[in-house]
């Protein structure tokens, strides 16, 4: 089977480039995949049938059009995987229903797996505390123990607090005030490059990671 994996950006691309083979086996043995990054999550268009704005490269804005295009390929061996962060959405089930509802505008419908990282991809790193401590031995064990898995708690900031002396406050003083800050994105990339290689996909405590892992395995079995 071939998987077309749609993600928000470079951080997700980096992490999944490491984790995919650990979940469904080495590339071409027998599955293949391509991971497509976008420039952020964006928002779903009001009209799912409209042609996307070429000036908007975000994932959700382009998702209806991409799903229609994949459906028209009409390939039995194709699986489209969509991975997004829950972020500030209050209801994971309602958000997923919005995503799966896009298939109603596809004829034919592609074979799809929609998965949501709760609250953000960084929750997956926090789901493997052994990997996190191996990559960052100086991490604060008290703050790590206090973290509630997959809670909506400004996850990347919580991870920064755990991993770095002075935590997020130091970087805010230096001008880091939002998720789109280049400094924040650099830290997210660093975490993906250093923690993901240490992760054991079988022991991960994150429920959203387990859903992603098990969904891939079920549909590629």
Image (spheres, rainbow, N blue to C red):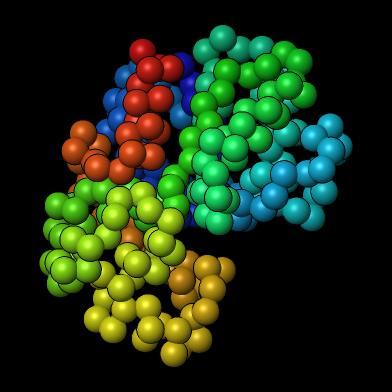
Residue at image x 55%, y 44%? 91
Residue at image x 38%, y 32%? 211
> On the rendered structure, is 88 left or right of 28?
right
**Horizontal and vertical percent position of residue 44:** 72, 44
- Residue 7 showing in the rendered view: no
**Horizontal and vertical percent position of residue 102:** 70, 29
**Horizontal and vertical percent position of residue 144:** 21, 63
Report the number of numbered marks: 0
- Residue 71 showing in the rendered view: yes
Residue at image x 25%, y 70%? 163
Where residue 168 sits, quadrant-wise, is bottom left
> Which residue extends farthest top?
76
Residue placed most toward the observer, 200 or 161: 161
25 is higher (above) or lower (below) than 162? above
**Horizontal and vertical percent position of residue 160:** 33, 70
Quadrant for the C terminus, please.
top left
């Amino acid at each position: 089977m071939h998987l077309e994996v749609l993600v928000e950006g470079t951080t997700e691309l980096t992490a999944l480039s490491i984790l995919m083979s650990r979940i469904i086996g080495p590339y071409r043995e027998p599955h293949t995949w391509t991971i497509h990054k976008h420039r952020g999550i964006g928002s779903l268009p009001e009209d799912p049938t409209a042609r996307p704005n070429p000036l908007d490269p975000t994932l959700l804005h382009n998702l209806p059009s991409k799903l229609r295009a994949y459906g028209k390929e009409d390939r039995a061996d194709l699986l489209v995987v969509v991975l997004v962060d829950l972020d500030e959405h209050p209801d994971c089930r309602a958000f997923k229903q919005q995503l799966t509802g896009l298939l109603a505008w596809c004829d034919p419908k592609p074979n799809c797996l929609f998965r949501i990282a709760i609250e953000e991809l960084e929750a997956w790193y926090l789901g493997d505390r052994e990997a996190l401590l191996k990559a960052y031995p100086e991490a604060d064990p008290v703050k790590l123990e206090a973290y509630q898995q997959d809670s909506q708690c400004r996850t990347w900031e919580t991870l920064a607090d755990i991993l770095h002396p002075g935590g997020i406050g130091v970087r805010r003083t230096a001008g880091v005030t939002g998720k789109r800050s280049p400094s924040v994105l650099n830290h997210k990339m660093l975490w993906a490059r250093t923690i993901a290689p240490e992760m054991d996909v079988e022991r991960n405590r994150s429920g959203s990671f387990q859903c992603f892992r098990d969904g891939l395995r079920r549909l590629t079995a």
